[in-house]
């Protein structure tokens, strides 16, 4: 169980700010989606929230404590991040790779406990990797490597899960299974924050949104109130139209023909 | 007589073990199985420093100390020039090291050209990697044991570090701290190995590769087995060098290169560049 406070946070690379100062509080039990164009800073925000990049201004706090002052191992039990890219250059098995998620739960000289092993097996099962568990992690397919990374995060059991484009490279079955799993985690009083490029996945799963507009402004709040045609056009630079029913709204981009000429 | 043989075997074991462990640590730091003290120019730096000391008539701890400084320097250059960001391609780090190695070998040639005495022959042998010298293995063995204990404790962190600094950090590793320890350990092990037996190449490449094939990549198992196999491997090469059918006295470093270069090329050919 963890909460995240973004306090007048300005994030970016090499001193170049990507947004105006963001102030948002995300509490445990909430499912957040971060929406924005490519390059709007979704990944940079995720890296900043996980303490991989220093904030340009303002601060990030986990459960009220400034991220800077939390040792990595303590932080890893409260907050985990699924990175977009990762690779394994050495012949670890899938099970060994997933076991890495238990690092923060024990002193370095102690081997994995029975509870650790049980957690790893559960993570393998939930990501459909049990049959692949003894295969080499550097030899499975791209989508499977993605699931190895997700299983590692599940084995880590953090209170808050930050997920940078978690369903990239996944087929529909695993995509839905995974988003359902994250929804369960949120219902189980964990905090979920997902960056997504697919507005329809966000509208189906998220109850809160953080929208990073191309001009550097932002908005945060209830998904139901923020998902409007005006805002989405501002967000993506193309008109989107709402179709489908009121319970399951669906957004489709209108093609070039219906777009006003610049 | 038996004592002399025992000391020789222990020296061979210490040097082989240190080179293998230095190789594993450098492979963690650079995240590629192609990293190794000799290939990265760390051995070359240590050897150049040792050679300068010999030319100046210095010996003992002077050689070890200056070899250590140059090892640290050489490895630092690899990271400072090659770049140390999470997204720096590993090939760039490796290439920086290879160029460093080339640089050191020019330095060594020049230093040898300066010296005209009969001792050049001894120096040449040392530079090719030679175990047939009267040397005491004890410092090497003690360092090796201490390094192994440190490595054993760090092993789970090393398993995470090879997945990238960012991934390791979010899983709970204090990345900079672990990297610094690896870096210092790798330099110390290389410097001592070079002081004892000259810059023997490719042990740190061949041995960890073979051990990974048998026991997998987990460092808690990989490190002790690499040290063990490294020690036995180098003594084995020395035994081959001592065979009566091998002409003259072949330095063990030559044999190690004969085995190591094909293994390096094989691993390089399997590596996906730029991935």
Image (spheres, coloured by chain):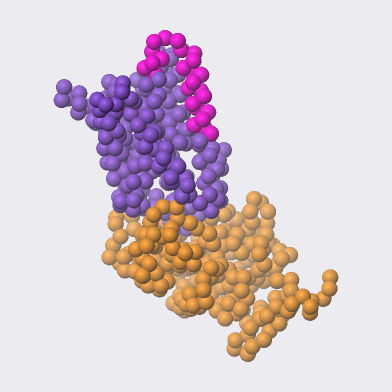
Chain colours: A orange, B purple
Q: Main secondary structure of the magenta part?
A: helix
- Can you say whether A123 is above or below B180 in the image? below
Query: Does residue B118 belong to the magenta stretch?
Result: yes
Q: Foreground residue, B36 or B190?
A: B36
Q: Foreground residue, A109 or B213?
A: B213
Q: Residue furthest right?
A: A262
Q: Is residue B41 visible?
A: yes
- Can you say whether A151 is above or below B143 in the image? below
In percent of width and height, residue B51 lies at 43, 20
In percent of width and height, residue B21 lies at 35, 40
Which quarter of the rendered picture does the N terminus of chain B lie within? top left
Q: Quadrant of residue A17?
A: bottom right
Q: How many marks?
A: 0
- Tell me which residue sits at (41%, 15%) in the image: B120
Q: Is residue A26 visible?
A: no
Q: Residue furthest left?
A: B2
**Relative side of B154 to B228, left or right:** right
- Tell me which residue sits at (50%, 27%) in the image: B104
Q: Foreground residue, A41 or B227?
A: B227
In percent of width and height, residue A188 lies at 44, 77
* Residues rendered magenta in the picture: B99-123
Query: Does residue A145 belong to the magenta stretch?
Result: no
Q: Residue furthest top?
A: B117
- Can you say whether A256 is above or below B21 in the image? below
Q: Quadrant of residue B16?
A: top left
- Tell me which residue sits at (25%, 31%) in the image: B239
In percent of width and height, residue B273 lies at 53, 49
Q: Foreground residue, B115 or A231?
A: B115
- Tell me which residue sits at (46%, 17%) in the image: B112
- Can you say whether A232 is above or below B55 in the image? below
């Amino acid at each position: 169980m963890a909460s995240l406070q973004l306090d007048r946070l300005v994030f970016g690379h090499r001193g170049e700010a990507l947004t105006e100062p963001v102030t948002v509080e995300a509490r445990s039990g909430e499912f957040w989606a971060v929406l924005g164009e490519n390059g709007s800073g979704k990944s940079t925000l995720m890296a900043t929230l996980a303490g991989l990049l220093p904030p340009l201004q303002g601060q990030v706090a986990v459960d009220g404590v400034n991220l800077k002052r939390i040792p990595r191992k303590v932080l890893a039990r409260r907050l985990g991040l699924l990175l977009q890219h990762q690779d394994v250059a050495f012949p670890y098995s899938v099970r060994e790779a997933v076991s890495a998620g238990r690092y923060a739960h024990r002193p370095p000289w102690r081997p994995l406990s029975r509870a650790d092993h049980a957690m790893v097996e559960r993570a393998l099962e939930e990501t459909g990797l049990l049959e692949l568990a003894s295969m080499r992690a550097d030899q499975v397919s791209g989508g499977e490597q993605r699931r190895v990374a997700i299983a590692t995060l599940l084995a880590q059991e953090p209170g808050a899960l930050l997920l940078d484009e978690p369903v990239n490279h996944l087929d529909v079955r695993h995509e839905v299974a995974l988003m359902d799993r994250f929804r369960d985690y949120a219902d189980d009083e964990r905090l979920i924050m997902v960056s997504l490029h697919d507005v329809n996945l966000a509208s189906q799963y998220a109850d809160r949104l953080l929208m990073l507009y191309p001009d550097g402004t932002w908005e945060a709040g209830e998904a139901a109130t923020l998902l409007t045609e005006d805002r989405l056009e501002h967000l993506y630079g193309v008109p989107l139209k709402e179709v489908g029913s009121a319970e399951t709204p669906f957004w489709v981009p209108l093609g070039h023909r219906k777009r006003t000429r610049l | 007589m038996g004592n002399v043989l025992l000391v020789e075997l222990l020296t061979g074991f210490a040097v082989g073990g240190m080179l293998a462990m230095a190789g594993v640590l450098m492979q963690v730091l650079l995240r590629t199985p192609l990293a190794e003290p000799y290939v990265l120019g760390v051995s070359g730096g240590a050897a150049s420093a040792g050679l300068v000391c010999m030319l100046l008539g210095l010996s003992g701890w002077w050689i070890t100390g200056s070899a250590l400084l140059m090892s640290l320097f050489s490895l630092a250059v690899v990271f400072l020039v090659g770049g140390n960001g999470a997204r720096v391609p590993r090939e760039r780090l490796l290439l920086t090291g290879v160029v460093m190695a080339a640089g050191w070998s020019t330095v060594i040639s020049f230093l040898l050209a300066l010296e005209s005495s009969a001792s050049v022959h001894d120096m040449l042998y040392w530079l090719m990697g030679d175990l047939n010298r009267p040397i005491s293995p004890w410092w090497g063995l003690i360092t090796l044991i201490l390094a192994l204990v440190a490595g054993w404790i760090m092993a789970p962190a090393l398993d995470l570090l090879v997945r990238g600094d960012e991934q390791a950090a979010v899983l709970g590793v204090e990345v900079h701290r672990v990297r610094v320890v690896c870096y210092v350990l790798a330099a110390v092990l290389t410097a001592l190995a070079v002081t004892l037996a000259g810059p023997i190449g490719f042990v740190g490449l061949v041995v960890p590769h073979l051990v990974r094939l048998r026991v997998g990549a987990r460092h808690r198992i990989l490190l002790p087995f690499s040290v063990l196999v490294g020690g036995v491997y180098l003594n084995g090469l020395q035994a081959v060098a001592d065979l009566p059918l091998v002409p003259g006295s072949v330095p063990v470093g030559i044999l190690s290169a004969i085995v190591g270069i094909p293994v390096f090329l094989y691993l390089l050919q399997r590596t996906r560049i730029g991935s």
